[in-house]
């Protein structure tokens, strides 16, 4: 037996047996561990609503003594969600004002009172006030278009309103 262990064949067999035993023992010996990592995601942001007046019906406007009677113009408008995600529309505020929301006024004849927002009712609100239209409120999908309308009426304020003749009072729409 001593001769076999010192022979080449014996040494190869012994080495093979040691390797087999070592791998068998190694297969049962291990460590456990945990690990952590970090990553991130990118979130978009809201996009301003696109608001556009699409049609006008009725009119022209003349001074009326009472809100809701007489000559009324109805203006149809749309609110579009141009973002890539869903957005919540609360309401649209509408008033007679410039495109930047500032006060509008015309006074071709300086001897007479100016024509301004206080000559008009928007959506049945008091003259000069902002009308709040919440009829289209809710979540709007990307690209979704909501349509609504608002009335505009000239109210007789008891003063000379000649500066309103032929005027085109602008409407300012603010969606939020």
Image (spheres, rainbow, N blue to C red):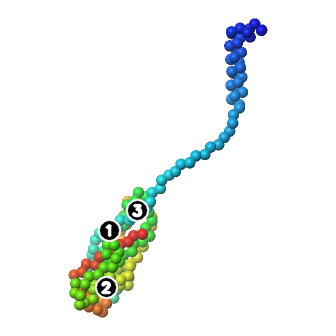
Question: Along the line of sight, which residue is nearer the eye, 60 or 83?
Answer: 83
**Res. 31 in view:** yes
**Closer to the N terminus: mark 2 or mark 1?**
1
> In the structure shown, which secondary structural element does the residue marked by tag 2 occupy?
helix
Q: Which mark is residue 47?
A: 3
Residue 176, given in percent of the width and then of the height, sits at 42, 69
Residue 14, given in percent of the width and then of the height, sits at 71, 15
Report how far apart the C-alphas of labels 2 and 3 lie in the structure: 34 Å
Report how far apart the C-alphas of labels 3 and 1 lie in the structure: 16 Å
Q: Which mark is residue 95?
A: none
Picture residue at 36% right of the left edge, 79% below the top: 123
| Quarter of the figure with residue 63 | bottom left
Return the residue at label 1: 52
| Quarter of the figure with residue 147 | bottom left
The N terminus: image quadrant: top right
Residue extending farthest to the top is 3
**Tag 3: Cα neighbours inside 10 Å, few (<14), some, or many (≥20)?**
few
**Tag 2: Cα neighbours inside 10 Å, few (<14), some, or many (≥20)?**
many
**Res. 96 in view:** no
Return the residue at label 2: 119
Question: Along the line of sight, which residue is nearer the eye, 38 or 149?
Answer: 38
């Amino acid at each position: 037996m001593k001769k076999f262990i010192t022979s080449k064949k014996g040494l190869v067999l012994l080495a093979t047996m040691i390797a087999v035993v070592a791998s068998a023992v190694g297969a049962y010996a291990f460590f456990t561990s945990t690990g952590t990592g970090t990553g991130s995601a990118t979130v978009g942001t809201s996009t301003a609503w696109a608001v556009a007046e699409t049609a006008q019906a009725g009119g022209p406007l003349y001074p009326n003594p009472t809100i809701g009677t007489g000559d009324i113009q109805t203006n149809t408008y749309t609110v579009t969600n141009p973002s890539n995600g869903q957005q919540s529309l609360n309401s649209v505020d509408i008033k007679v004002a410039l495109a930047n929301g500032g006060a509008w006024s015309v006074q071709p004849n300086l001897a007479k009172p100016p024509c301004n927002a206080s000559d008009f009712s928007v959506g049945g609100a008091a003259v000069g006030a902002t009308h709040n239209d919440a009829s289209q409120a809710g979540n709007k999908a990307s690209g979704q278009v909501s349509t609504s309308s608002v009335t505009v009426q000239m109210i007789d304020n008891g003063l000379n309103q000649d500066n309103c003749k032929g005027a085109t009072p602008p409407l300012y729409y603010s969606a939020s």
